[in-house]
Each structure stands twice: as structure tokens, then as C-alpha cells.
Amino acid sequence: MSLLVAVFLALGLQAAAQETRTPVADLIGLTPTEVGARTGAAPDAGPGDAVRIAEAGKVLDLYPVRRFWRQPARADEGCLTGLEMEHAEGDSIERRRALMRRTGALMVFEDGRLSGVYAEPALPPAPSTGAPMTTREMEAQMRGPRPPSPLTVAPGRLPLSDGSAVLARLEPAAAGAALVSLCRTVPPRTYRSDPGTDLIWGLVGLTVLPFVPFQQAEEARADREGGALLASAEPGADLGTTAEDWVGRARGARVYRDSADPGFAIIAIKLGSGADTAAKVGLLGVRGTRVVWKVEREAADQTGLRALVCRDDANRATNARRGCSGTGFLVP
């Protein structure tokens, strides 16, 4: 749960929320730019924000619904957006929690026009005892099994190995579904400095400071070289050779295959860090020598494709594939 959402839930009924409701039916047939304008999202939505699949003569763009979340109108405002399958009213904590569990929907555009909205199964409520979680409990939760993802043909398999056929596994939004945003004023956070804590963090900063230029140089190299490699292949293109030969000895690039489906491969390419300072990745789905799909940076994270590369057959985070951490974080 993000800090903003946690603060939003904690506010309860302290301030009235402003609700914005956009029926899914009103968005069908619109372009990504038009959908963003209707929902109040950040402008200039484009293919780089989506998974692009080129197959059987058509182009599909799968956008994570969070790309079309309403943006706060003011610096002191926080908004929570989710897919609401049935009409609801009010501003209860239960309603906001229900919206949080429906933030994983995909908006599918065919040849540039919205053709459907597909909701991932709602996440079950997390069990809570009311006591703060320990570090060990948090790590166990991160490594624990997750509900099966419709983006894979089976748990542990590489994601989107069947390309556009994934739509058959997704749950179409109900006829009355809508994108709902609840926005409210977030009170300013107060911070009281602790000289002892500030001194400790200052000393920690001094120990890592000598490595910052090297880290920045590595990130710049990854963004330059990885970005160029990723830009050289588009969905529908024929690599002319195997994924392994196409990657060659490029730094920060790996090829993953399934023993159950060796004809499909995912090429993972390391890119520079984003706003959260974590390294980003680009992914290419390749069938034979042809690129079937492509996704990069935030879209790889928000659709969950990056994490699904690092899952076992029980859908637990695993480091069995090279480049995966024990918590399921992929860095090629």
C-alpha cells in the first residue's frame, strides 16, 4: 500500500471527498488521449505507457488503468482511483478499500481505440491483527504465494507467452462498471527533527557518497545502451535470428525461456532508474524470431509483467531465474 493511499484511508470522515465517476461505456471507442482527458489523468498517454502486442494483423495496446488515474488538482489533494464494478455511494473506508483492490485493471485499445476494460480478480482483503508487521512478516508476505495471474497461461510460466490470446483469460468489466476517483484534502505532514537520527543518516550518507558518481555513470550507460537496444526492436518486427544471438554480448540484457514452451522467449533489458531511483527494465516477448510484444519502464512495473518473470509454479517470488531477487524483483 502506498503512503498516499494509507494517509487517504486514515483520514476517515475528517474531510468531505470529491467523487468523480466515469462510466466505462462512455469511454469505449476513444483514443488514449481522449480517455485521459475524460478521467483527469496526466496528458500525453502513448504506446510507451502500455504493453503493445502486434499479432495477426492487428495492434493491441494494454494500458494499466492507473495510467488514467485522476491527477490531484492541488498540491494538498490526494486522489484514490479504482474500477468500481457496481454502483456505490458515500465515502466509507470499506468503499475506499474496495477501490484499492480494483486498481489492477487493463484498458485495451485496438488500433488506437478503446475496445474493452478488463478487471483483474479483486485482491482478497489482507488479514490484519491490528499489530504492526515485523520485517520478517513483511518479507514472508512478499515471498508468499499470490493468486494466479491471468497474464500467464499457468503459474511459473513466462507472461504473455500466448500474445493477444490473454484477453480470453481476463474478466471483462461489468456493464455498469465505472472508473471512480475519490479526492480529498491531505493535511500537511509535520516532521520534528531528531539530532541523533539526523547525525546517523548523515554518517550513512558519507559512506555511500564516494560511490554516487559511479552509480550515476552506470545508470546513464544502462539508459543509453539499453534504450538504444530496446528502440531497435518493435512489435511485429523480425529479429532475423534467435533472441540469444540478437542480444549477443550486450551488457544488462538477458534472455528467458520456458522448458514447457521453448519457442517463446522474453528479452529483458536494463534501463536507467526512474523517479523512485530503482532501475527500470524493458521487455520484449519473442515467438521464434518475431517480436510479439513490447513494454518498458513504468508500464512493465504497473502491469505486473516484470514481477511475473520472477515467479515459480506456486506463484511465489523466486530467484530461480538469473537477475531475480528473492523478493521477485527483476534487474537483468
Image (spheres, rainbow, N blue to C red):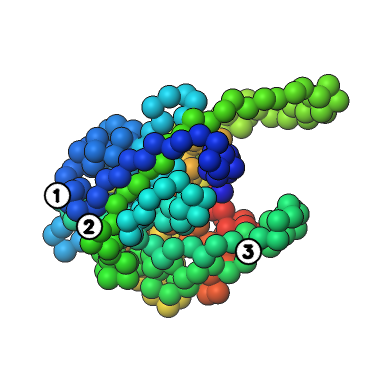
- Label 1 sits on a secondary structure element that is loop
Q: Position of residue 17 (x, y in %)?
A: 44, 37
Q: Quadrant of residue 121?
A: bottom left
Please give the name of the residue rendered at 25% of the width and 58% of the height, measured from the top-left corner.
176
Amino acid residing under circle 3: Pro
Q: Residues within 10 Å of mark 2 (few under 14, many from 20)?
A: many
Q: Nearest to the eye among marks 3 and 2: give it.
A: 3
Give the amino acid at mark 2. Answer: Gly
Residue, x 16% and y 45% (percent of image)? 30
Q: Residue at x 57, y 39 (%)?
A: 11
Q: Residue furthest right?
A: 196
Farthest residue toward the bottom?
Answer: 260
Residue on which the image places disc 2: 116
x, y percentage for residue 224? 43, 33
- Measured as percent of width and height from the top left, residue 47 is found at 27, 43
Q: CA distance from mark 1 to mark 3?
A: 40 Å
Q: Nearer the viewer, residue 257 or 61?
A: 61
Q: Secondary structure at mark 2?
A: strand
Q: Earlier in the sequence, mark 3 or mark 2?
A: 2
Are dots 2 and 1 in contact, CB under 8 Å?
Answer: no
- Where residue 286 sits: x, y (%)? 33, 61
Which of disc 3 and disc 1 is earlier in sequence? 1
> Is the Cβ of the residue at disc 3 closer than 8 Å to that at disc 2?
no
Amino acid carrying label 1: it is: Gly
Q: Which residue does the numbered mark 3 point to in the structure image?
A: 127
Q: Between 259 and 89, which is closer to the camera in this rendering?
A: 89
Against 206, residue 279 (above or below) is below
Q: Which mark is residue 29?
A: 1
Q: Is 214 or 170 nearer to us in this picture?
A: 170
User: Taking the image as drawn, is residue 254 in sight?
Assistant: no
> In the drawing, what numbered circle is on residue 98?
none
Measured Cα–Cα span from mark 3 to mark 2:
32 Å
